[in-house]
Image (cartoon, rainbow, N blue to C red):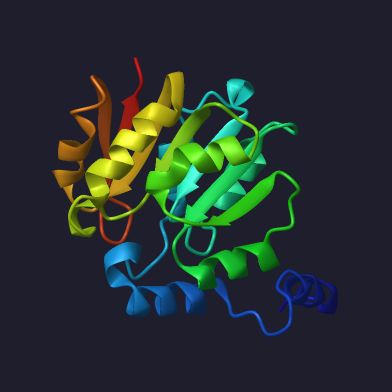
Amino acid sequence: MPSSTTATRRARSRPAGVPSPWQMFFSGFLKHPVMVGSIVPSSDKLIRKMLDPVDWANCKLFVEYGPGVGTFCRPILDRMAPDAKLVVIDTNPEFIQYLRHTITDPRFFAVLGSADAVESIVADHGFEKADYVLSGLPFSTLPPGVGPAIATATHAVLRSGGAFLVYQFSPKVKDFLTPHFESIDHDMEWWNVPPAQLYWAWKD
């Protein structure tokens, strides 16, 4: 049984009136299934495998599309250098508000906007390029034209040697990556619900 101190610490980790991550994620899926893409957050195994190739020592700006309830945000912040930034972009104002309430790390910035505007968002935060971009957006179910626009903008905003990290439940996402990236690594994470396709698309 947890001690009163542990219980207090857990209670303080989320402000009063702010729902739990599971409540937020499930609610977001019900309201925007085309944009969320899954009914449950990613597994710890998927997170570790997805982030393993990142060169954290040379990462100053990490960008995430569709952060949801922040499943990847905390692991990314745990690995990032003290002077690096994590910028997350989501079109769901409820997710953005939730993240701003629950993640107080000064390196973290939650932006309400669209991933295809990543170049201007990165510039607004004082950078010319991003080192890595992570996405769990369901490319195969996005509205027509949105997927290609995001892939084009992502390739443009990445520095040489950077990578677009993508986890999906459909291999069709590779069709969006191949017009822009020549070097694409692929793996599967079976210990996820549902099993996920993992891609690392390297620039130049």
Q: Residue furthest right?
A: 5
Figure quadrant of residue 33: bottom left
Q: Quadrant of the N terminus?
A: bottom right
- Image height of 176 relative to 9, above or below: above
Left or right: residue 46 compared with residue 189: right
Nearest the eye: 170 or 156:
156
The structure residue drawn at horizontal position 44% and vertical position 27%, both measured from the top left corner, is 158
Q: Residue furthest bottom?
A: 17
In the image, residue 178 lies at what x, y percent? 19, 29
The structure residue drawn at horizontal position 60% and vertical position 69%, both measured from the top left corner, is 97
Left or right: residue 150 compared with residue 176: right
Figure quadrant of residue 19: bottom right
The structure residue drawn at horizontal position 38% and vertical position 37%, both measured from the top left corner, is 165
In the image, residue 133 lies at what x, y percent? 45, 37
The structure residue drawn at horizontal position 30% and vertical position 34%, both measured from the top left corner, is 152
- Image height of 198 relative to 20, above or below: above
Figure quadrant of residue 188: top left
Q: Quadrant of the C terminus?
A: top left
In the image, residue 30 lies at what x, y percent? 34, 79
Left or right: residue 125 compared with residue 118: right
In the image, residue 36 lies at what x, y percent? 35, 64
User: Does residue 196 appear in this view?
Assistant: no
User: Does residue 96 appear in this view?
Assistant: yes
Left or right: residue 7 compared with residue 78: right
Looking at the image, how many numbered discs can be counted on the residues?
A: 0
Nearest the eye: 128 or 99:
128
